Amino acid sequence: MPAPKSCVQCGKCLEVCPLFKATGREELTPRAKFFLESICAGDDQGAGLSERDFKSLASLCLSCGRCEKNCPQHMSGPALVTDLRAKSKGFTQACWDLWLKNPGLLWPMAAVLSKFSPEILPEPFGSARKRMQALFSRSLEPWADLVPQAKFEERKVMLFKGCVGRYARKDWSIKAERLMDGMGLIRGEDADFSCCGSSYGSAGLLERRNNSRAKNIEVWKDAGRPLLVTFCATCLKGLREYSLADFAGDEELYESWQECLTPLSSLLLDAEVKLRENVPEQVAYHKPCHAPDDDTDQKLVGLIAAERMLPVQEGLCCGFGGIMQLGAPELSKEVGDYSLAQHTKCMKSGGQILSGCSACVIQLVSLVKDDYFAAHWLDILK
Ligand code: SF4
Ligand code: SF4
């Protein structure tokens, strides 16, 4: 039997952890998390750290997954944190659960209430207010038209809108559907998909995650296994993470699911681009932590922005971090501010930062300052 993996304290994860990059705090790094875990597992109280201290420290993680990719031992910060959160559910998880369980009712209500709350609020309410406004904000004038090429796909396609596209930014879904229709794709009826499950998983709400997965698989099967088109990098990652066990061990079904997951941008790379007069001078692409290796959102933004596109900076995290922005809003903001400072340090006033992840967009819109703008790439399209 192979020996269980363990952290060798090499520090490779420090090079990529956005929490460490933005704060310089060693105690937030994956290395520290695994070190503290080993102390707690050995029941060694020498560090003077209670189990509760350890859990609250270790739960400060953005679930970006960068540590795992850079670790020679393949140690996974997100897996450790998910496990801890699953074992010790608290008030923050209960709030997160409520927030995701009823978005159709809660999100619009919270957005309306946020307009009537005072400008300056103590944390975590101040950050929550800004995010609420960002969730529904449409501050960018479109500056490009895409004329998609016809696709002769025989199979039916369906749009997986994600929670944001379904309940808050319905305009993204409408634009996505219009683009799909423009390609001549056979679009199925709107279906009652659930959350992709990723937000539940990173919060340690594993039963909810599994229920969401089961519901989505059922809807997809009932619709005749259509291509599932997404416009959010985190949804795509969440859907790709479904395991063979979620398909009751049916390998053919599992393979078919994986093959059906299709980023919208991948269908648009041959589209004709027409720019309007209000095109910005400079555009930056914010690469989400959850972007796939073949990041077609980045390619599409490059295709549209062409010479206006600034070099893409790797390794910047928006700081949203799912449940972490509820439990540690200052830290979440610090990471987001750090990334925005990197994006804008060589950017002219009026520059736009585009991304293809709903969470990144909400976070960046809530933090962006001065004369800069943040948006989903769908926002720049008429
Ligand atoms: S978690 Fe991995 S990369 Fe980080 S210190 Fe441990 S072994 Fe090295
Ligand atoms: S998942 Fe990201 S934020 Fe969390 S410990 Fe790993 S690198 Fe740091």
Image: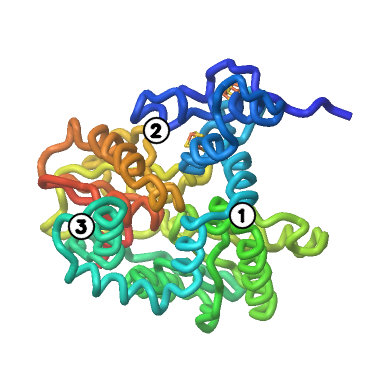
Question: Nearer the observer, disc 2 or disc 3?
Answer: 2
Residue placed farthest to the right in the image?
A: 1
Q: Residue at x 18, y 69 (%)?
A: 115
Disc 2 vs disc 1: Cβ atoms closer than 8 Å?
no
Q: Amino acid at mark 3?
A: Leu
In the rendered view of the protein, which quadrant contains the C terminus? bottom left
The quadrant where residue 71 appears: top right
Cα–Cα span, label 2 and label 3: 27 Å
Horizontal relation, residue 365 to residue 155: left or right: left
Image mark for residue 240: 1
Question: Nearer the observer, disc 1 or disc 3?
Answer: 1
- How is the protein colored in the picture? rainbow
Image mark for residue 264: none
Which residue is labeled 3 in the image?
A: 275
Q: Residue at x 69, y 28 (%)?
A: 43
On screen, residue 244 above or below 165: above
